[in-house]
Amino acid sequence: MSESLELWAKCLDQLKTDINDEDNFNELFADAEFYKEENNYIYIMIPKAFYKMRVEKLYTDTLNSYLKSFSSDLKKFKFITKEEKERDEKEKETNPFTTPTTSSTMTRNLSPIYTFKNFEIGESNRFAFLSAIKVAETPAIYNPLYIFGDVGVGKTHLMTAIGHYILDNNINTNVVFVTSQKFAEEYFLVTKVNKNPTSIESFYNKYHNADVLLVDDIQFLENRLSTQEEFFKLFEHLASQNKQIVITSDKPANELKNTMDRLKSRFNWGLCVDIKVPDKNLRINILKSKLKALVKDPNDVPIEVLELLADCFPNNVRDLEGALRSYITYCICMNEPFTKENIYLALERLLPKDLNSVPSQKNKDIIQKTNEIVCKYYQISEKDLISSSRKQQIAYARQIAMYILRKKFNLSLKTIGEAYGNKDHATVAHGVDKIEVMLKNNTLTKNDIDLLINSIEKK
């Protein structure tokens, strides 16, 4: 038995003991096989794509942690399907883990970023996720799949991921995605505005020929009784043909107001799953995932920044992701460091009112210590240092202080400017840049700064 195969067996035994669910374990791993070791990865073949996806989402981190405890080598597990293994054996140069971008992926009426791969799992959405991939793997097993939850928790993401998965496995499947508002508008146009046989026939063909119907935000059909009647007929037609229907809503079916009882009853026919508000760990994981597309090295953004963002935007994932994009863009454009303090500057109008102020006590202490040391060293008063005086000795000392606060303590340009007579960003940046140039050519300036920083740290 090879070392890698032996490690796989050990990790599998440990997982079986820890999860204490023999049926689930056997379902996922009964046919799993060691394939190869390459580039510090141990490749495990899991025949079914559906099972592979569940293993990757739920158990990869756990299995890799076992591997780390059993071996000092920096190895990790990678999981592939039988088809990927066969492709790898035929074409060694091809990376079997990179999903090719097909023309169908580019033209299908589904957001390309809403896939199962990009969906972060936590306790708040685990059941909904597992239900969604079950439906994607076996359409019409639950009909309809009704996903409900508050705004911005991932309902549309999961529903769209089902569509992508089905198309990835059968490009000829007719997947129709529509919002309830769009459905109502189309129905109104063909029955009240155009009123011609061709338009009506086109409308019916579009929806009645669907193999998979994805309907987003069904709650917007409330009070639209004629459209509800038409949707009920469509539902009955597709269900009788064993076609998959997936519906999202901001509330359970029973709580839909001014909606036909028989329609609400149909929504409860299949499987209703709830996506709850994400907990803090899930929100942080979502931010970590999004960072990969926003900065070159996600490690440049400290964990305390992500934690604060997660605290400030606890209920809506869209708001959370938007806040992260705004924060990153602000820091890059303004040449500011990725600090907690800059969250308050970048997102001033987006933060809850009770959080919308810079936590400045720490900054005040740093500025005060710096001013005291700099004034004593250059024999000037603090009043002169924070004044608008342009005398050479005072301006030089002020620029030295600004440089130290910026480069040593990572204070923002705005915070520094406010500490020295409400000077603007450009003035502070100019002073910092001027000292930076002097450091390259003047050893006395470097010695001054080293002495000052040493004194500030000791104070």
Image: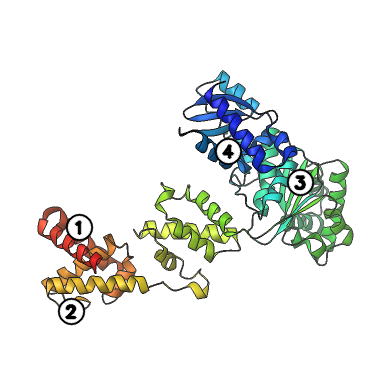
The residue tagged with tag 4: helix, strand or loop? helix
In whole angstroms, how far apart are the C-alphas of marks 1 and 2? 23 Å
Horizontal arrangement in the rendering, residue 209 relative to residue 294 (left or right) = right
The residue labelled by disc 3 is 213
Residue 120 in the image, given as x and y percentages of width and height? 60, 49
Q: Amino acid at mark 3?
A: Leu
The residue labelled by disc 4 is 63
- Tell me if mark 4 has few (under 14), some (14-19) or many (20+) residues whose alpha carbon lies within 10 angstroms of its own: many
Residue 283 in the image, given as x and y percentages of width and height? 56, 57
Horizontal arrangement in the rendering, residue 78 relative to residue 263 (left or right) = left
Residue 410: mark in rendering: none
The residue tagged with tag 2: helix, strand or loop? helix
Most distant residue in the bottom direction? 383
The residue labelled by disc 1 is 436
In whole angstroms, how far apart are the C-alphas of marks 3 and 2? 72 Å
Q: Reading the chain from its start, which is encountered first: label 3 or label 1?
A: 3
Q: Are marks 4 and 1 in contact (CB under 8 Å)?
A: no
In whole angstroms, how far apart are the C-alphas of marks 2 and 4? 63 Å
Q: Residue 24 is drawn in which quadrant? A: top right
- Tell me if mark 3 has few (under 14), some (14-19) or many (20+) residues whose alpha carbon lies within 10 angstroms of its own: many
Residue 310 in the image, given as x and y percentages of width and height? 53, 61
The residue labelled by disc 2 is 384
